[in-house]
Amino acid sequence: MAFGWGESIDVSFNQRDAILYALGIGETDLRYTFENHEDFAIHPLYAIVLGFKGTSSDVCTFPSDAMMESKPAPGTPNDMTAVVDAERYLEVLQPLPYDGGEFKLKSRCISIQCKPKGCVMENESILELDGTPYVRLISAAFFRGTQYAEEKSAGTSFFTPLKPPARTPDKVVEEMVSPHQTQIYRLSGDYNPLHIDPEFAQMVGFPEPINHGLCTLGFATRHVLTGMAGNDSELFKSVRGRFASPVLPGQTIVTEMWKEGNKILYQCTVKETGKVCVSNACLEINAAPKSRL
């Protein structure tokens, strides 16, 4: 099942945007934060925010114009007040130009899986420049509501189950999320008040603003890429992860990794609570570095 590609939306970025994103996921490596470094590159996970920011480099509303422009396909769930970001996958087809550019982002629905308390809709997106694909993204969103349980599932879920091996992790990294991390990360395009406004967070059932799920994924990706591939963007092929539970700013993310050939299975927990925050997760590396543009 596929509803066909919708109309592409315009997205763009410059070096400042890319550096700001890198800082937002806690990056300190000069290869991603200093534009004059001899190996300066765009962080391989950066494209995951372009659907939020569109072409803007200023503060956006939430939902942003780009999010509103990229509407769900007719006949699919579209109640954005009842949706939760569930799972993400990003694959770099070729490295993004280090000086940025103006791109097209096209999307389509590839799967709808109905559950007792709602449904999971999966969308595939391709980031292109002059018809050349650069990044492939797949997202799973959970739409809450028993009305969706009456619908029929269609298509096959991309996110097949993954479990860590039953052995000691090959590497473990612990890192505290800065109490102010969401204030930096949101500047890359996701201005949801849940991540900064205490009153809004309490209104929707959280004791305080929570870390962006995609920021948590950024921390995890950085941990694995650094721990297993020298934080080299040319070795990055793809990453996936499920948002199992929220992380609060000031808490510590513990990332456990198991190397299985070119795939590194990983899992993240919150040290203070013991809860898994990222599951069903894997980062795949290239056998050899790709040539930089």
Image (spheres, helix red, strand yellow):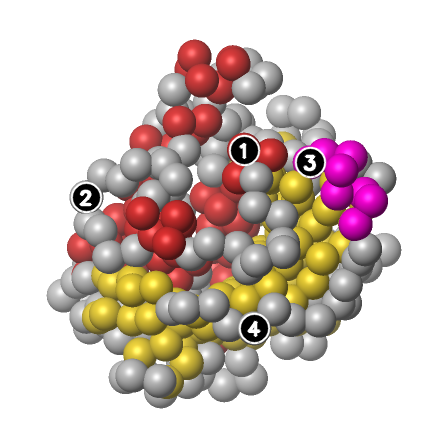
Nearer-the-camera pick, 81 or 137: 81
Determine the CA span between mark 4 and mark 3: 24 Å
Compare marks 2 and 4 and give the one earlier in the sequence.
Answer: 4
Compare marks 4 and 1 and give the one earlier in the sequence.
Answer: 4
- Residue that carries the numbered disc 3 in the rendered image: 144
Nearer-the-camera pick, 254 or 241: 241
| Residue at the image position 47 percent from the left and 60 percent from the top | 226
Q: How many marks?
A: 4
Determine the CA span between mark 2 and mark 4: 32 Å
- Residue that carries the numbered disc 2 in the rendered image: 58
What's the amino acid at mark 4? Gly
Quadrant assignment, res 100: bottom left
Region of the chain picked out in magenta, as a range: 144-151
Residue 4: mark in rendering: 4
Residue 232: mark in rendering: none
Is 146 colored magenta in this rendering?
A: yes
Residue 81: mark in rendering: 1
What's the amino acid at mark 2? Asp
Compared to 46, does 183 lie above or below?
A: above
Compared to 77, does 62 lie above or below?
A: above
| Residue at the image position 51 percent from the left and 13 percent from the top | 202
Residue 125 appears at what percent x and percent y? 49, 67
Query: Comparing marks 4 and 3, which lies closer to the viewer?
Result: 4
Determine the CA span between mark 1 and mark 3: 9 Å
